[in-house]
């Protein structure tokens, strides 16, 4: 994994008494401890580093290797510095496609805005500094929130079912305190009770069983630990436009949908922009083109080309996922109660329903 499992059988090396651990030694020691947090997703036994390709270790990190369960002897490959606990992307393949093609478009540091940071803190209510804590991110995508979590100084374990972890590793893999791996939310390969914080944002509604996906996260909280989620909110009266469109296009798959968007959104954007220049009737007619605003100024300084990309990403995100299951806030509250969480907070905000609870 990114910065874990590497040299797991070697203790951190000591420099002289004045300097303490070398940088490599500190990293190897952290990696050894990170390995101790993992468990077989099938039998829950401990894992060991069974093999590492010669010459595949750099900076204390294993790029290619094999993990083995000490209980059932199941094996899990380490590929491109990340352990893989699932054989395929299953229902999440659209997100693997999406985030490896739009791998930087939502990164605050690339887009020179604070959209991800604003959403992260508004949803979680967590402090900006969390040194010494462990955070679990369920469903990382290309790592827009991984970046924010790492900025707090916490140690972050981040996973996704899809191969979007490749994009996350590219964006955040150089951080020493991140551990990125591929796994199912229903079979998380970690030891229970090991995390101070868990967050899952933009993910649950895209799981086959939304409630069970949430409940699968709770056991990994330490006593007193907090879990934060968001999930789309169901409209009781008129479903959003995308739910009328999805049955006609989702079956096409992400590649074909993306190809369709590439030939429709840019000209639609230019037409809407031209109509806005027509006095009196232009703007009302332009607003009938369902692609959102043609500018987010003064808050966001997107170029026209960037905004077209944003709109293609947004449409792909709405239309290509296999699962899209919005929820009622009363049901989400009941999940938290069933999980035995306390200090439950519910509100509507970014992405629909925002919910937070604490392990007693």
Image (cartoon, helix red, strand yellow):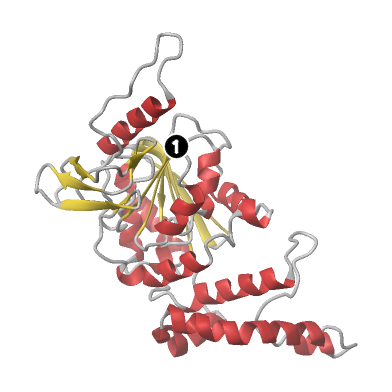
Tell me: 346 left or right of 302: left
Q: Is residue 124 visible?
A: no
Image quadrant holding the C terminus, namely: top left
* Residue extending farthest left: 72
The residue wearing badge 1 is 176
- What crowding class fits label 1: few (fewer than 14 Cα within 10 Å), some (14-19), or many (20 or more)? some
Seen at 28% across and 55% down, the residue is 84
* Residue sitting nearer the eye, 354 or 22: 22
Seen at 34% across and 46% down, the residue is 1
Q: Position of residue 230 (x, y in %)?
A: 48, 58
Q: Is residue 284 visible?
A: yes
Residue 38: quadrant of the picture: top left
Q: Position of residue 56 (x, y in %)?
A: 31, 44
* Residue extending farthest right: 279
Q: Position of residue 226 (x, y in %)?
A: 43, 41
Tell me: 90 left or right of 303: left
Check disc 1 and report its element: helix, strand or loop. Answer: loop
* Residue sitting nearer the eye, 225 or 144: 144
Q: Position of residue 314 (x, y in %)?
A: 57, 72
Seen at 33% across and 28% down, the residue is 29
Q: Is residue 319 above or below residue 12?
A: below
* Residue extending farthest top: 17
**Badge count:** 1
């Amino acid at each position: 994994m990114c910065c874990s499992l590497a040299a797991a059988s070697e203790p951190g090396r000591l420099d002289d008494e004045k300097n303490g651990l070398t940088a490599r030694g500190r990293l190897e020691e952290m990696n050894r401890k990170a390995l101790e947090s993992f468990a077989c997703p099938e039998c829950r036994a401990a894992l060991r580093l069974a093999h590492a390709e010669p010459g595949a270790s750099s900076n204390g990190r294993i790029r290619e290797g094999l993990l083995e369960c000490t209980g059932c002897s199941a094996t899990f490959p380490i590929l491109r510095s990340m352990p893989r606990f699932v054989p395929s992307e299953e229902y999440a393949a659209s997100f693997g496609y999406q985030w490896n093609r739009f791998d930087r478009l939502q990164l605050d540091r690339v887009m020179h805005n604070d959209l991800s940071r604003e959403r992260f803190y508004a949803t979680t209510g967590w402090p900006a500094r969390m040194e010494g804590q462990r955070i679990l991110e369920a469903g990382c995508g290309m790592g827009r929130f991984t970046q924010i979590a790492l900025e707090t100084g916490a140690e972050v374990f981040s996973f996704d079912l899809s191969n979007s972890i490749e994009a996350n590793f590219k964006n955040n893999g150089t951080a020493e305190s991140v551990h990125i791996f591929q796994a199912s939310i229903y079979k998380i390969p970690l030891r229970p009770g090991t995390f101070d914080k868990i967050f899952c944002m933009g993910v649950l509604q895209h799981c086959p069983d939304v409630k069970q996906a949430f409940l699968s996260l709770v056991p990994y909280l330490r006593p007193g630990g907090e879990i934060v989620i968001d999930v789309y909110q169901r409209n009781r009266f008129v479903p959003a436009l995308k739910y009328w469109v999805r049955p006609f296009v989702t079956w096409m798959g992400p590649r074909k949908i993306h190809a369709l968007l590439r030939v429709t959104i840019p000209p639609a954007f230019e037409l809407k922009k031209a109509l806005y220049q027509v006095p009196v009737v232009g703007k009302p007619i332009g607003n009938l083109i369902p692609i959102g605003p043609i500018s987010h100024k003064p808050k966001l300084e997107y170029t026209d080309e960037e905004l077209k990309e944003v709109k293609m990403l947004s449409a792909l995100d709405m239309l290509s996922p296999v699962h899209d299951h919005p929820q009622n806030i009363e049901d989400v509250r009941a999940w938290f109660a069933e999980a035995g969480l306390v200090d439950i907070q519910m509100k509507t905000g970014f992405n629909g329903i925002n919910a937070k609870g604490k392990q007693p």
